[in-house]
Amino acid sequence: MIVELYWLVPAVVALCALFLFLGWFVAARVSQNKISVAEQRAKEIVEVAEKEAANAKKEKLLEVKDEWFRKKQEVEKELNRQRNKLHNKEKQLGEREESLNGKFEIVNKKEAAIRGTEDALKTQQDELVRHTERINHIIAEQTEKLERVSGMSRDDAKNLLIENMLNDAKLQAAQQLKEVRDEMKTTAKKEAQRVILQAIQRTASDHSVETTVSVLNLASEDMKGRIIGREGRNIRAFEAATGIDVIVDDTPEAVILSGFDPFRREVARIALETLMADGRIHPARIEEVVEKVRKDLEDEIFRVGENTLLDVGIHNAHNEIKRRVGKMKFRSSYGQNLLQHSVEVGWLCGIMATELGLDPKLATRAGLLHDIGKTVDRNVEGPHALLGMEIAKKYREHGIIVNAVGSHHDDIEMESPYAPLVQAADAISGARPGARRESLEGYVKRLEKLENIATGFEGVAKTYAIQAGREVRVMVEHDRIDDTLADQLATDIAEKIQSEMEYPGQIKVTVIREKRAIAFAK
């Protein structure tokens, strides 16, 4: 029994050792497998991380390249814009330089011409002095011969000459008196009308002269750039919406609105002021503001027509008549505002109808509406009198008014006394002084010609055309023109103006002879 236990103990120990070895071996294999799996997993994670980092790097590089390309395009666009702007400036400077060179050449030519003229004048002056000495010598010889031949002394001949001149002056005065009497005979029938006209003109209201441009002041020069917009899109949108040309030139802090339609020009002016005050200037906003201003102005036109009819005492008018009367505010005829002209004609018709015992209200209404045909759109053809007659007939105006409107330019036959009243009042309002303006160019040329005619006489120092060409004042040299010659000079200038010029009314010639004596007290 003891022997069996002796062999059993080593066997158990050996078996335990075997189990321990097997346990260690299995644990080592498991640990080795785990380490291999972990290393493989770590390797995979590293590879994924490297791929993601590479992808992220590529994305960032692409983003940087896109941003760089976009910035490059912006810089290139800005450089192109600055380059174009610089090119335009260089082109403008070149044009100005060419213009200045041309003007400089013209000035040089004029200076050369003036020098040549001065030399010619000096030569003529020397010849004139020689001729004057020769003439004086000849006059002295002729005077001596005349005294010997006629047997008259110099004083006797002078007295005879004065007597002949007096007779000529009396004959000229008689002829002028006859002309005045003949003129009075031909104008006697119009004298009473002239007196009445002077009284009627006192009721004429001030007129306003319409122009084709409106100047709009700006708060700063920067506003011009905002009005023009990027590549000119704002100014093009504004001109397309209003039908008015916007001129942005070198005038500081101002733009010019140019157009022949006063209504459109007023819409453009108010719209531009609204846009500048609002600060939002872009094509969509421009169209919105222009449309709103146009509607507001249409409402204002109706209110103006309604108030005008009430001011002249006209009631029960059709709304379309009121609107067309208001549109007259933005129409002109030969520079005379159509609304003020029509109101003036209405008042004149009322005054004359009262004097003739006719209905003043009916006459006033006919006078106010006589030019209503001018409010029709310009693309409608036909005389404005007949167009106005059709409008008056359409909106059921009185038959007398319809005939007066249609016949005030003799387009149809007059059927009542009110028609010639409207015609006469229309002529009075249009022909009174200052009602209608002539063209600036013709006006300036007429004044220049008037002054040149007076300057062409000997002894004249200076000439001034005043009172819009109705009077010319002539300053003479006191040592060359005496009082007697001054009277004759005024007559000669008046006769030359009458023979060489065409003008309304009359021109007054005033010759002024003045001598100033100056001394200084020390």
Image (spheres, rainbow, N blue to C red):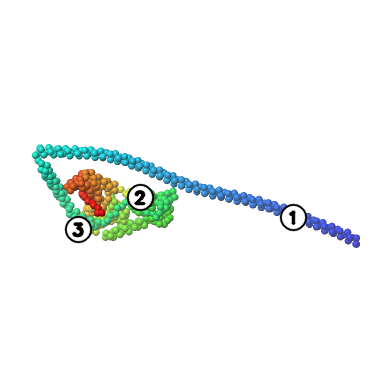
Which residue in the protein does label 3 denote?
355
User: Looking at this view, is 208 or 13 the one in front?
Assistant: 208
Q: Quadrant of the N terminus?
A: bottom right
Mark sitting earlier along the chain (2/1): 1
Image-quadrant location for residue 153:
top left
In the rendered image, is residue 14 in sight? Answer: yes
Which residue in the protein does label 2 denote?
258
Q: Residues within 10 Å of mark 3 (few under 14, many from 20)?
A: few
Tag count = 3
Q: Marks 2 and 1, Cα distance to the nearest angstrom?
A: 97 Å
- As drawn, the residue found furthest toward the left would be 151
Q: Marks 1 and 3, Cα distance to the nearest angstrom?
A: 135 Å
In the rendered image, is residue 363 in sight? Answer: no
Foreground disc of the pair 1, 3: 1
SS for callout 1: helix
Q: Amino acid at mark 3?
A: Glu
Q: Amino acid at mark 2?
A: Ser
From the top left corner, tell me how far across and down residue 428 is, in percent: 23, 53
Which residue in the protein does label 1 denote?
31
- Taking the image as shown, residue 491 lies to the left or right of residue 111, namely left
